[in-house]
Image: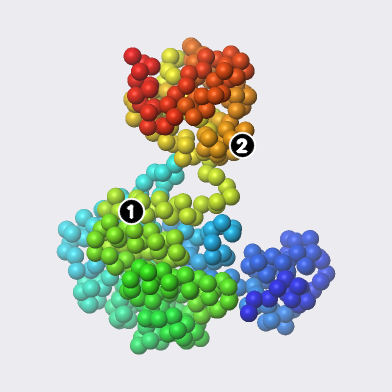
């Protein structure tokens, strides 16, 4: 059971030495109770206290790492059920399934397709993290051959899928440096799998058909010395699977139930491509640590990666771009000037439409604390005064031979005052960004 801050404080030195980085022992105890720091930050805690506080110092969901270096994937260590309570910290890993029954040409084609599953969205690259290699052939040699080809052709993290411990042993020789996830330990092979994972310091997926069996199995594996586990309750309907994921998360966070305090893995079951995307998106939202899909088409993975990107941003910190003048295309002194806010989605939507128009233009991103146009206007963050100040301080006047500026149609009401404040001629653009191409073409004609 989780201890309160005051209960933890009773076991601390109470010297207020500040060696932990906090002003008092009580402040440290409160942070420890909230799972925001670890007990090892206090260099003076007694061995007796460590034993008592060990549970309080552990995160409710263990942090598990797959892979190494800059491409490593960290899972778990979440602290809330709902994003608005704080935020989600470690984005779900998204991967694609590859079966070792593919011939050489089909394998090469699939790896090439998977390597291209990276996209740019609102100024950031979003991409998949994993390839799950399934030992469908049951052959150790074929399994190792396919894994070797994948290791040579991609930097993505790996999941090695086989219940045959001998087959996994052969593949670890090829892929150990990538620190793959071993899949999976079951009630019939968990001792051998645990020994293999422990010997090579690799994370281990644990499979059982229900949560009771899963909790029992994780305790047995932990007792064998393996701590980094990923949980799987097997193929089920999306509704039942989401129930499992939600219950697992709730037991870990609300009840501090250690046997289920690990990240989870899910494999999509839908055979229809559109349904598979929807199924996978549901798992990302509710609360999968890893989602593996059969589909590898860009149109399937882009929406899934977009959902992940949105869910794992901090809801209290809007995604922003730097407030400044941006050049879209080969601009010149006669190029039009448009203004918008510095909310990333707003800016990149406007920039994309300007680019689509084929008419080079300047886009000025005004500091509106990351709000969209209407929200910023209602909050008085996107005003005639702030736009006029940006026009004056951004240096745009020295780049152009005119003093015309286009404002979003939704804030047409600002045009009169903006002309007074800035001395510029204000043109009212379209309300929706989709109208920008035709608007700019009409200006140029």
Q: Position of residue 194 (x, y in %)?
A: 42, 82
Which residue of the protein is positioned furthest toward the top in this rendering? 401
Is residue 415 rendered to the left or right of residue 145?
A: right
Tag shown at residue 357:
none
**Quick check: can you spot residue 151?**
no
Question: Can you say which quadrant of the picture contains the C terminus?
Answer: top left
154 versus 425 height, above or below:
below
Q: Quadrant of residue 207?
A: bottom left
Q: Position of residue 62 (x, y in %)?
A: 53, 71
Q: Position of residue 420 (x, y in %)?
A: 61, 15
Q: SS for tag 2?
A: loop
Q: Calculate the distance from the C-alpha at mark 1 to the C-alpha at mark 2.
A: 36 Å
The residue at 43%/66% (across/down) is 288
- Residue on which disc 2 sits: 379
- Residue on which disc 1 sits: 301
Please tell me how many numbered marks the rendered image carries: 2
The residue at 49%/29% (across/down) is 410
Is residue 323 rendered to the left or right of residue 166?
A: right
Q: SS for tag 1?
A: helix
**Quick check: can you spot residue 415?**
yes
Q: Position of residue 56 (x, y in %)?
A: 65, 75
- Which numbered disc flags the more N-terminal residue, 1 or 2? 1
The residue at 52%/28% (across/down) is 411
């Amino acid at each position: 059971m989780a201890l309160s801050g005051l209960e933890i404080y009773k076991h601390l030195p109470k010297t207020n030495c500040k060696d932990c980085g906090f002003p008092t022992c009580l402040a440290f105890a409160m942070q420890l109770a909230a799972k925001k720091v670890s007990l090892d930050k206090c260099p003076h805690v007694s061995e007796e206290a460590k034993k008592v506080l060990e549970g309080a110092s552990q995160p409710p969901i263990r942090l598990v790492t797959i892979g190494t270096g800059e491409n490593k994937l960290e899972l778990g260590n979440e602290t809330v059920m709902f994003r608005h309570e704080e935020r989600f910290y470690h984005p779900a890993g998204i991967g694609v399934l590859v079966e070792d029954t593919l011939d050489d040409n089909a394998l090469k084609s699939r790896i090439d397709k998977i390597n291209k599953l990276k996209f740019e969205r609102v100024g950031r690259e979003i991409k998949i993290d994993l390839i799950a290699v399934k030992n469908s052939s049951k052959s150790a040699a074929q399994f190792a051959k396919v894994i070797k080809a994948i290791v040579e052709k991609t930097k993505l993290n790996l999941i090695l899928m086989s219940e045959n411990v001998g087959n996994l042993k052969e593949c670890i020789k090829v892929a150990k440096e990538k620190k793959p996830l071993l899949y999976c330990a079951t009630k019939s092979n968990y001792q051998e799998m645990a020994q293999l994972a422990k010997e090579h310091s690799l994370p281990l997926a644990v499979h059982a058909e229900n949560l009771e069996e899963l909790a029992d199995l994780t305790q047995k594996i932990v007792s064998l010395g393996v701590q980094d586990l990923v949980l799987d309750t097997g193929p089920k309907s999306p509704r039942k699977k989401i129930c499992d994921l939600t219950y697992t998360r709730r037991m870990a966070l609300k009840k501090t139930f250690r046997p289920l305090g690990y990240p989870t893995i899910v494999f999509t079951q839908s055979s229809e491509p559109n349904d598979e995307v929807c199924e996978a998106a549901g798992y990302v939202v509710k609360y999968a640590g890893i989602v593996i899909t059969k589909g590898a088409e860009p149109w399937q993975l882009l929406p899934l990666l977009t959902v992940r990107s949105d869910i794992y941003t901090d809801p209290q910190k809007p995604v922003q771009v730097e407030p400044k003048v941006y050049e879209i295309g080969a601009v010149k002194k006669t190029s039009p000037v448009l203004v918008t806010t510095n909310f990333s989605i707003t800016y990149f939507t406007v920039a994309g439409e300007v680019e689509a128009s084929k008419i080079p233009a300047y886009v000025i991103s005004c500091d509106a604390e990351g709000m969209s146009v209407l929200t910023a206007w209602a909050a008085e963050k996107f005003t005639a005064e702030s736009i006029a100040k940006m026009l004056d301080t951004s240096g745009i006047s020295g780049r152009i031979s005119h003093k015309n500026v286009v404002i979003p149609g939704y804030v047409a009401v600002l045009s009169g005052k903006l002309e007074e404040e800035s001395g510029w001629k204000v043109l009212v653009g379209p309300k929706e960004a989709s109208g920008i191409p035709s608007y700019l073409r009409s200006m140029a004609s």
